[in-house]
Every structure is written in structure tokens, then in C-alpha cells.
Image: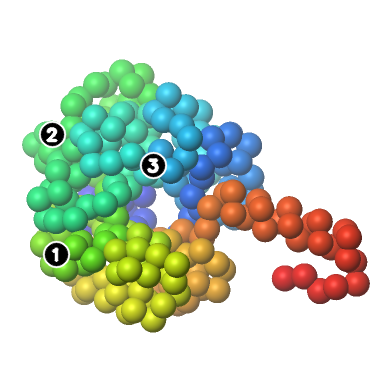
Amino acid sequence: MSTLSGLRERIHGTGHQLLGLFIIVPRVEVVEAAAAAGFDVVILDCEHGPYGVDVLSPLVAAAHGAGIYAIVRVPGNDEQAVGAALDCGADGVLVPHVGSGEEARRVARASRFPPDGNRSVHPWVRAAQYGAQDRYVSSANHSVAVLAMVEGSEAHARLDEILHVGDLDGVFVGPMDLAASLGLADAPDDPRVHAAANDIVARANHSGKATSIFAPTPQDAHTWLAAGVRLVVLSVDTALMHQAFATAVKTTLNPTEKHV
């Protein structure tokens, strides 16, 4: 791990943990506001957000200009989508619904240039500074973080084979889909969901993989940070905006009430 750099080095390190935010509103201003608020990472959500690779470059540039990392959640386990996101200069990729070791290997290989993987080389894209970056291929292989989402009961059952994939940097626990896979879609706070998430985090930590997880509330985020999770993603931009809007309205209309 001594040759690692960038986000890949950070998520494997033992120092400062990372706090992230999902971005589904594709605006530079939202990314910059997240950075100004103190987030370390934004996850540009091309799975659930209403945008694609065509708008990623300015969002990644906004994150880097503000001094934070940008990860792209691609729509699915697709080599072209992974490569396109990384060509835009993303610091890492988050791939949803990885359910087996074979699927995890496909994720890792799509994210690494040969000989480590099969990512297509194009030295004139944004990630390579349009041809100005020396040793682009080796630099990218050392710095790009690759995370697989473990978010279903099948993936949980096959976790050991996922964790054995060498070039996969870590796993990301998706508690909402995990709850749904357990028949608890309307009860994501059920103890069975928490038990499954805790088991995934513990086994990933034991294997040496980086751990990451979605936390819908600050209280949840604090719990996971205290448990040593390397990257905790606190909520979604739209959720935090809605909460702030609602609090502002309630405070204005009912100024004597206490609002959390």
C-alpha cells in the first residue's frame, strides 16, 4: 500500500476519516456549497440523479477547485460507464449492486489500466490533463479508489468472495437496499438491518478492505465514524436542503417553538 496516492491512499490510511455527501442536483453551486460546509467528498450520483457523464466534468472540477474529492456512482456495473467517469477526472468510482466475487473483479478490472485491469487508455482526456500529465497510467492505477456497493442479502451471503478481490479498495454498505432485500424496505432502522450492516463492516475491516457506508442522519454518521468506518456518506443534497427549508419555514411561522 506504500505506493498508493490520492483518494486511494486516503481511504486505506489510519488518519482523518472522510465525510461525504451524495449529490443528485447536478450544479456546481451545490458541490461548492458542500465543500464550504466542510465535507471531504462528494459522490456524484449517476444512478439516482437525473444526469450522466455529459455533465460530470464541471462537477468534478468544482470539487477539485474547492479542495475536496469527487467520486462518481455509476449507473451500473458497466465497463464503459466506469471508464467514462474516470476519464472525467473522478477520484474514484462507486459501483452499485455488486453481488459476487466475479462482479467485483469486473468492477476492479474496469477501473485499472493494463496490466492491472482492462480500462481503455486515452492520454488526452481531462483526467490526464489533456496529455500534459506524465506517467498518467501508473498514476491513475495508484490513486483511483474503487468501491463496490454491498446492498443486498445475496451480496452479504457472498461477501467473502467479494472481499478477496485484490484490486477492489473497499465495500460500501447501502442500508436502504439492504433493508429492502430483507423485506424491510419500510423499516431501514430495524435491528436486523443494523446487524447485517455491522457484520459487513466488521468483516471488511478484518479483511483489510476500506469500509464506507451511507448514513441518513448525523446521529447515524457519528455512530459509524465512531466504529472506524473510513468514509461515511451523510445524507443527500436534496434531503439536507429540504430539512433546511422546512426548518426555516417553521421557524419563521412559529418563532417561539424549538426546531431541531
Question: What distance separates the C-alpha of mark 2 from that of mark 3?
Answer: 23 Å
Quarter where residue 159 is shown: bottom left
Q: Amino acid at mark 3?
A: Glu
Quick one: label 2, few (<14), some, or many (20+) residues within 10 Å? some
> Residue 137: horizontal and vertical position, in percent?
22, 32
Residue 38, percent from left and from top:
59, 55
Quadrant occupied by the C terminus: bottom right
Left or right relative to 70: residue 140: left
What's the distance in space between the residues labelled 1 and 3, CA to CA?
Answer: 23 Å
Three-letter code for the amino acid on which mark 2 is drawn: Asn
User: What's the residue type where badge 1 is placed?
Assistant: Arg
Q: Earlier in the sequence, mark 1 or mark 2?
A: 2
3 lies above or below 140: below
- Can you give x and y, in whole percent of width and height, for residue 124 in the image? 31, 18
Please identify, in this view, whether the residue under mark 2 or under mark 3 is nearer the observer. Answer: 3
Q: Residue at x 21, y 34 (%)?
A: 79
Residue identifier under label 3: 47
Q: Is residue 210 shown to the viewer in this render?
A: no
- Please give the label number shown on residue 118: 2
* Residue marked by disc 1: 158
Q: Nearer the viewer, residue 9 or 91?
A: 91
Residue 91 position, x and y percent, is: 37, 42
Q: Quadrant of the N terminus?
A: bottom left
